[in-house]
Amino acid sequence: MLQAKRILLIIGGGIAAYKSLDLIRRLQDEGAQVRCILTKAGAQFVTPLAVSSLSQDKCYTDLFSLTDEAEMGHIRLSREADLVLVAPATADLMAKMAHGLANDLATTALLATDKPVMVVPAMNVEMWAHRATQRNMALLQADGIAVVGPESGVMACGEVGAGRMSDVADIIAAVKTHFSGPLGRPLSGLHAVVTAGPTHEPIDPVRYIANRSSGKQGYAIAGALAALGARVTLVSGPTHLPTPKDVDRVDVEQAVDMLSAVEKALPADIAVCVAAVADWHVAGENGQKIKKEASGAPPSIRFAENPDILATLSQHPTRRPALVVGFAAETEHVLDHATRKRQRKGCDWIIANDVSHQTGIMGGDENLVTLISADGAEQWAKADKHAVARQLATRIADWFDHRRKDS
Ligand code: C5P
């Protein structure tokens, strides 16, 4: 399966480095050629001698080694590989990768490479959950870097939670998937439409009605789907966010325009409606700015209902996407309301979240969600919106994978 594939394995400094010795062997068993860089911190956990004995090659450690530079410069080292695999990837190493720091051989090779990169994080629970690490993860994913794990369980430090390096068998499986699919992008060939942000419903040429949605969650989902290879059309209400990498963005203001843009983007395999679409727009044209009445009486505004984009897609007679996902932002009875919403709208999954003021979710960086499907409800751990997006994109890829296998 991995016959003649050249893998540059970068071993970072963590107790999980001992698993990397086994990883070298298992990759070789699959036919891969493994060349290793051991960071200075990594060498505190495993020795260069063990690494070079197992890889049957030199263990590269030093950026400024004259002989290494003469025999095999860091540029060549990073280019003469089909895949750069970082295992264990420590919080420090990922932070350096995310920000382009290059002060040793490992980080220099990572910055110089033009090859796909896969990271296998391993660290303490709190370090993994830290916003800084999650931010860096989001940057790495936006750069197209694949991530394996981490797993939950008991850590070497005795704490329990997410941060444990994936098992060697899982890493090998991910490497195989990488080489089997079109560059390990399980959603390639699929088109996803994502709605995000608020809508602005005009009252007159200068005033509008809006809501507190920042668009962060929807943008992160669009980016995460693109990182897994989907062609993504992001139909966005007004936001201040940059367009995620490899995403086609269509800007709209009102709900009616959002629906037209979504319908224009069809056919799609996946629809994820994250936008906080206004339920009503102001009825009747106010072509001119409404002026204050001399009498001081405030104007009255009449509302008319907006189209429901999620329901329209879910019940589309001819072009219903295979998987339609909606969001349910609720302030009370979250699960009840969301479960009923799934049935009412006819979508496949609802991602429910509590946006009551004290949660700080609306406009904030974190999200606490429950996935509701026909199979029931599943609460996910509170996480950065980018982590939630990655988890959802992976679930979507799994769904299509099962569907392919079943057919
Ligand atoms: O009915 P409610 O607004 O609570 O439903 C939320 C879900 O429906 C979200 O997925 C949102 O994007 C979608 N929606 C929509 N069009 C509307 C209202 C909501 O797509 N007009």
Image: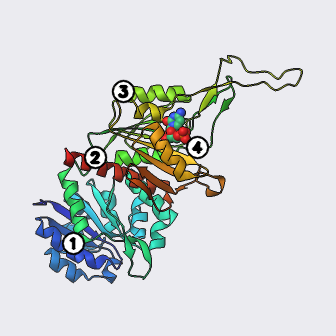
Cα gap from disc 3 to disc 1, whole angstroms: 50 Å
Q: Quadrant of the N terminus?
A: bottom left
| Residue 180 place in picture, x, y as percent | 17, 52
Q: SS at mark 1?
A: helix
Q: Secondary structure at mark 4?
A: loop
Comes first in the chain, label 3 or label 1: 1
Left or right of 235 in this view: 179? left
Q: Is residue 230 above or below residue 6?
A: above
Q: Which residue is mark 3?
A: 317
Mark 4 vs 1, N-terminal side: 1
Q: How is the image coloured?
A: rainbow
Label whose residue precedes the other's in the sequence (2 or 3)? 3
Q: Amino acid at mark 4?
A: Ser
Q: Give the label on residue 400, or none.
A: 2
Mark pair 1, 2: CA separation: 29 Å
> Residue 205: percent from the left, percent from the top?
67, 22
Q: Which mark is residue 23?
A: 1
Q: Give the foreground label among 1 and 2.
A: 2
Above or below, comparing residue 393 to residue 55 in the picture: above
- The residue positioned 24% from the left and 71% from the top of the image is 168
Can the viewer see residue 124? no
* Residue 389 appears in the figure: yes
The CA distance from mark 4 to mark 1 is 44 Å
